DNA sequence: AGCCAGGACAAGT
DNA sequence: ACTTGTCATGGC
């Protein structure tokens, strides 16, 4: 990884297999948008502006220190995806999927934001998920500038009333968010402790939140806790796996990286096997 | 104009 | 253990 600073911007090259657009637009995060070739979104308490060109990443308005402390981790740039792809490419399906979507990295997002976002995601579509999250942040997050607000903390959300939630238009998910905020804020579910638990145990803890089932729990584990062996199974993946493997199971060799394999297959199938998703 | 969305839950077999 | 209706709301 090579880093060069020019003016207020910072450029990173030699980062191995990485695709910024795929990574930010693959359904694992909901707060980025592409404007004039620049991806822009709030991460933590910062507005991030980043672009990719010729295999290099340019971070706008970014110091060396900020890149090292935040974005290097956020984009998971220190994980050896080449090796993972090598392991996954042991069969035809996963090789094709990896060839196409192997540039996707699993972001290291804020865990509370992931919990709340994937609760909102259930039985919902991406544009509306983004709208609800946008209204949540604008209404209850901290203002960075006219158009950008932080994601409200679990503590803040634990003090919100049903009337506070009403303008978000989140429907039946409100009671789920309220329970999640309460259990995280009061420590009933201890995020630090979950990091140390075996996968099944951590999943069962997360499912104590009203409205969190297997699929959402696995999304939280994969996208929030960087548990690459967590496998979120939705209707699309179910169809794709059944088509490719005859059942809703990945081959043995892929299990340690089931979550990554799932992301690759999802995007591969969505583009190249569209007929699987048409009824 | 409906249909259905990267689900979860509860109540029925 | 599987199947089904229900839940709010609004993109498309």
Image (cartoon, coloured by chain):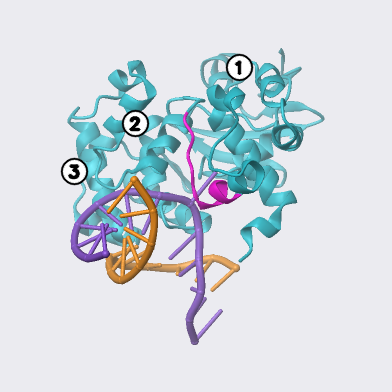
Chain colours: A cyan, B purple, C orange
Secondary structure at numbered mark 3: loop
Chain at tag 1? A
**A173 displayed left or right of A50:** left
Against A165, residue A78 (above or below) is: above
What whole-number distance in Å separates the C-alpha atoms at marks 2 and 3? 26 Å
Chain at tag 2? A
Instruction: Give the total number of marks visible in the rendering.
Output: 3
| Rendered image: mark on residue A203 | 2
Chain at tag 3? A
Q: Residue at x 34, y 43 (%)?
A: A213
Q: Where on the picture, by quarter, is residue A170?
A: bottom left
Secondary structure at numbered mark 2: helix
Q: Nearer the viewer, mark 2 or mark 1?
A: 2
What whole-number distance in Å separates the C-alpha atoms at marks 2 and 1? 23 Å
Tell me if mark 3 has few (under 14), some (14-19) or many (20+) residues whose alpha carbon lies within 10 angstroms of its own: few
Q: Residue at x 61, y 32 (%)?
A: A261
| Residue that carries the numbered disc 3 in the rendered image | A159
Please state the extent of the stretch shown in magenta in the rendering: A230-239
| Residue A110 location (% of width, % of height) | 42, 30
| Residue A118 location (% of width, % of height) | 41, 44
Work out whether residue A74 can be spotted. Answer: no
| Residue that carries the numbered disc 1 in the rendered image | A79
**B11 displayed left or right of A195:** left
């Amino acid at each position: 990884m090579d880093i060069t600073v020019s003016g207020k911007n910072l450029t990173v090259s030699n980062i191995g297999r990485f695709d910024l657009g795929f990574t930010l637009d693959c359904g694992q995060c909901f707060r980025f948008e592409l404007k004039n070739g620049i991806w822009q979104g709030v991460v933590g308490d910062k507005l991030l502006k980043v672009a990719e060109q010729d295999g290099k990443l340019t971070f706008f308005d970014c110091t060396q220190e900020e890149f090292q402390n935040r974005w290097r981790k956020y984009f998971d740039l220190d994980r050896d995806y080449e090796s993972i792809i090598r392991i996954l490419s042991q069969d035809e399906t996963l090789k094709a999927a990896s060839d196409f979507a192997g540039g996707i990295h699993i972001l290291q997002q804020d865990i509370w934001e992931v919990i709340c976002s994937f609760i909102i995601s259930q039985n919902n579509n991406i544009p509306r998920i983004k709208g609800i999250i946008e209204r949540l942040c604008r209404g209850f997050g901290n203002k960075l500038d006219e158009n950008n607000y932080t994601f409200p903390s679990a503590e803040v959300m634990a003090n919100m009333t049903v009337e506070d939630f009403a303008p978000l238009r989140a429907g039946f998910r409100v009671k789920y968010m309220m329970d999640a905020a309460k259990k995280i804020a009061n420590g009933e579910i201890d995020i630090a402790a979950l990091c140390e638990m075996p996968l099944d145990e951590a999943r069962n803890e997360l499912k104590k939140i009203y409205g969190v089932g297997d699929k959402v729990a696995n999304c939280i584990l994969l996208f929030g806790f960087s548990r690459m062996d967590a496998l979120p199974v939705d209707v699309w993946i179910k169809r794709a796996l059944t088509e490719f493997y005859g059942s809703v199971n990945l081959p043995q060799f892929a299990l340690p990286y089931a979550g990554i394999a799932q992301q690759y297959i999802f995007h591969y199938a969505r583009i190249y096997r569209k007929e699987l998703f048409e009824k």
